[in-house]
Amino acid sequence: MNGQPNTRLSDLFGLAGWSKGELARLVNRQAAAMGHPQLATDTSRVRRWIDMGEIPRDPVPRVLAALFTERLGRVVTIEDLGLVRRGRAGRRQGPEQQGPDGVPWAPERTAAVLTEFTGMDLMLNRRGLVGAGAALAAGSALSSAMHDWLHTDPVLAADAPTSHDPLHADPAGFDRYEAAPIGSQEIEELERSVEVFRAWDASRGGGLQRKAVVGQLNEVGGMLSYRHPVHLQRRLWGVAANLAVLAGWMSHDVGLEPTAQKYFVIAAHAAREGGDRPRAGEALSRAARQKIHLGAPDEALDLMKLAKSGSGDEVLPRTKAMLYTIEAWAQASLGKGQAMRRTLGEAEDLFVSDRGDVAPPSWMQMFDEADLHGMQALAYRTLAEHEPGAAIIAQRHAKEALALRAGGRDRSKIFDHLSLASACFIADDPEQADRYARLALSSMGSNSSHRTWDRLREMYRLTGQFAGYPKIEELRTEIKLALPRPSVKRARA
């Protein structure tokens, strides 16, 4: 007990709407269901947790996390509740002292946080709840909290959480994972599974396989609680980073924005624990792309500064090029055309300078010449909202992207067609715009990506000035009939 109120727990308690007596009764009932019938909590104990900062003993923090997760319909972890026995629980501190949601957490906590968060996410899936009821952390707060941490070398000796029982993982939700050693063959199988999930996501969007990816990540979190030889532990951290990025991207794809952001942060932690700073930087760049999509390009630029500087000296030119294209998109969103053109020029130079003598990591193999043109098309199409003359250049890059797209990249083709159609509308060419819009629309029914529908809505807005054209009127009607009705309000920064 530190005598200071646990403001995190207090805030979430207020959102939940319970009385202290109700929470005490729920804790006792839930603990019994989780195999702890001896637990006896009362109102005065709950008051001490909230008002005096007392941290209850295990299993109470896990019980509370499960209760708040179910009540609020989003993942709530022990860190979120301020119930970690480290420092002063729950005190609000400046970003230089502690970041949002305990970012960064101690190295030995990464596997435990990963396992706990995925376990809670799976519980939401099982109960049919949604996970969009939280606010996104600001990009500046995240980058400030993680800067010093990302620029230091990981301590591999702390790869796994310390425990009195080294063969036992930190439990999450209602599940217990019995840790055991695995070998290189099992890790190879996990690495292949990542490629399967990644290909499916690129083709069909994240909605259909998100639960499977989260479940696989949960299993890997349990495996990381066993101390493997360093070379195997590094590879396992790499698998965890790749799965966490996929879980985040799939969550973003279906509109679970706070959940997605947490997975991107977990991915950055996992990559750093495995000594792969370029991967950590790429994970943070995903959070930046999410911010641009949600209308916060200034916050995305904060994250991109950290992603670029934190990627280290071993980052390949092609990876740098990818990072620059995201930065350019953020600049375009702010109407900074000169800066955007300069940044895209640097991206092109970096891309062509990559001689290919070093094989790109698996997570970079999706970024090819088609993706470079696709991102340039998106940046110029975005800039065209501020500088209409940029629409012609956006069309050229979108056509190049479509010509180069390999099979299995259905979602990217939809984005290319939408960029092209939007650029044609801005360039006062409704005939061509109608053609490309229909190509996008015809492919969207088999795709589970909410982001494609968001981009379609952006394009639909541009059709308004051509509403008197019969063909465009017909297109507008078809789009309105095709657009899904939003089921929940998306959480924004």
Image (spheres, rainbow, N blue to C red):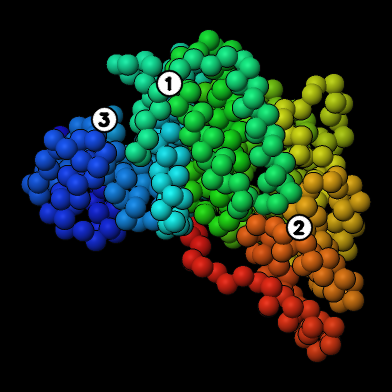
SS class of the residue under badge 3?
A: loop
Indicate the position of residue 210 as horizontal and vertical percent values: 57, 46
Determine the CA span between mark 2 and mark 3: 46 Å
Give the residue number, with chain letter if any, for mark 1.
179
The answer to whether residue 399 is left or right of residue 474 is right
Q: Eyeballing the image, is 55 above or below 416? A: above
Q: Earlier in the sequence, mark 3 or mark 1?
A: 3
Q: Which type of secondary structure does the marked residue at label 1 adopt?
A: loop
Mark 3: amino acid: Arg
Q: CA distance from mark 3 to mark 1?
A: 23 Å
- For the question of whether residue 123 can be seen, the reply is yes
Q: Quadrant of residue 382?
A: bottom right
The structure residue drawn at horizontal position 61% and vertical position 41%, both measured from the top left corner, is 246
Separation of residues labelled 2 and 1 (CA atoms): 42 Å
- Where is residue 279 shown, x and y percent of the image? 63, 31
User: Which residue in the protein does label 3 denote?
Assistant: 85
Q: Position of residue 475 (x, y in %)?
A: 78, 79
> What amino acid does circle 2 point to?
Phe
Question: Which residue is pictured at 40% across the width and 23% down the height?
Answer: 178
